[in-house]
Amino acid sequence: MRAIVIFIIVSILSIGIGVFGYTKATSSMEDLSKPGSSTITNYPNDHKPSSIDLSKYQMRMRWIYHSIFSNDCTKCHSKERALNAPFKSKAEWKTIIERMSAKKKADISTSHQKSIETFLIYDAKKRK
Ligand code: HEC
């Protein structure tokens, strides 16, 4: 008799823990398809170092990096997420930059988007 009671209690507890774990896991996920989704810190590229030697870059590219890219593209995630991304072509960067700029609170002007695109294509040619 006592064994049965203990068995039932253990069963109820483990179901409870399972349900709790599931709710926690799903609630901490963010819907990436929504343009409004904001800060996601756990992106593999965020944790890789970015080694970018600007000394060999054109003046204009250095300027875009410091004055535009480093402000606009670090509002929600590290600059590493962009710098370590595998994208190279104009089409790829255009798509990404448009997607980022469409996010809520991105606030990146069209002229800034154009400059960032120019910089990231140039940077990809230099480093990738
Ligand atoms: C409003 C917040 C926000 C801003 C501003 C922002 N990002 Fe993002 N970025 C995100 C979020 C959220 C993700 C993950 C979801 C996604 O890929 O849309 C992401 C993901 C990325 C990725 C990985 C995409 C992939 O498919 O691998 C790259 C690259 C990136 N951002 C580059 C940029 C660049 C370049 C800029 C500046 C023009 C920028 N981000 C500005 C929020 C932002």
Image: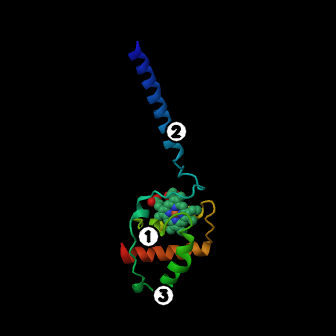
State the residue lying farthest toward the front. 2
Q: Position of residue 41 (x, y in %)?
A: 49, 58
Residues 89 and 3: in front is 3
Left or right: residue 124 compared with residue 66: left
Give the percent coordinates (x, y) of residue 22: 48, 38
Instruction: Look at mark 2 in the image and give the residue it sits on.
Output: 23
Quarter of the picture containing the N terminus is: top left
Query: Which residue occupies 39% across, 69% down?
Result: 49
Q: Specify whether residue 109 is in view.
A: yes
Q: Amino acid at mark 2?
A: Thr
Of residues 109 and 69, which is closer to you in this image?
A: 69
Task: Count numbered badges in the picture.
Answer: 3
- Find disc 3 in the rendering and name its residue: 59
CB of mark 2 within 8 Å of CB of mark 1? Answer: no
Q: Whole-Å distance between the Cαs marked 2 and 3?
A: 51 Å
Q: Earlier in the sequence, mark 3 or mark 1?
A: 3
Label whose residue precedes the other's in the sequence (2 or 3): 2
Q: Quadrant of the C terminus?
A: bottom left
